[in-house]
Structures are given as C-alpha cells and as structure tokens.
Amino acid sequence: MKVDTSGIDTTRLVRQVNNEYGLDLEVASFVPKGEEAYGYAATGRDGGVRHFIRAQ
C-alpha cells in the first residue's frame, strides 16, 4: 500500500488550489494510488463537490 511520503502540507495545497482555480475546497485527503505522483481527494465547503488533486 502506498503511503504519503511527499511532505506536502495539505492545508497549503488546498489554499493554493483554491487561489489558482477559484474553488472553495475545505480539506484534502491522501489517496494511496498511482506510481509517479501523489493524489488527494478534496471536498468543497458545500460538502457536495469533490475534486482530485494530483501532485507530482
């Protein structure tokens, strides 16, 4: 199982994605999939919209 060894601060990641893309995401959780990048599932403050963030 893949673990998050990226050292990425998810709070900062969410803030950056919100600023760059005009989103209103609240939290990002690590998704243990993929080989070349780290994936995070992010949920909007409204609770309904989910986004996938890929960090390489």
Image (tube, rainbow, N blue to C red):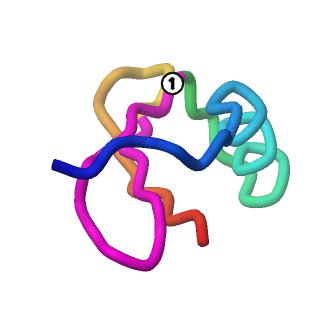
User: How many circles with numbers are drawn on the protein?
Assistant: 1
Q: Residue at x 48, y 33 (%)?
A: 28
Name the residue furthest left: 1
Left or right? Give the position of 44 relative to 2: right
> In the displayed structure, does residue 11 sit left or right of residue 52?
right
Provide residue 3's location: percent of width, then percent of height. Answer: 34, 43
**What is the x, y in percent for residue 43?**
41, 32
Determine whether 13 is above or below 45 in the image: below
Front residue of 55 and 16: 55
How busy is the neighbourhood of tag 1: few (under 14 within 10 Å), some, or many (20 plus)?
Answer: some
Height in image: 21 above or below 26?
below
Residue 18 against residue 47 in the figure, above or below:
below
Front one among 27 and 19: 27
Q: Is residue 31 magenta?
A: yes
Q: Which residues are magenta?
A: 27-42
Q: Is residue 6 above or below residue 30?
A: below
Q: Secondary structure at mark 1?
A: strand
Q: Main secondary structure of the magenta part?
A: strand
- Residue pointed to by mark 1: 27
Residue 21 horizontal side relative to residue 41, left or right: right
Q: Quadrant of residue 47?
A: top left
The residue depicted at 47 percent of the width and 70 percent of the height is 37
Query: Which residue is found at the position 44% from the left and 42% from the top?
Result: 4
Who is closer to the viewer here, 7 or 17?
A: 7
**Residue 30 in the figure: left or right of residue 1:** right
Per the image, is 32 magenta?
A: yes
Three-letter amino acid code at disc 1? Val
Q: If the image is split into quadrants, where does the C terminus sit?
A: bottom right
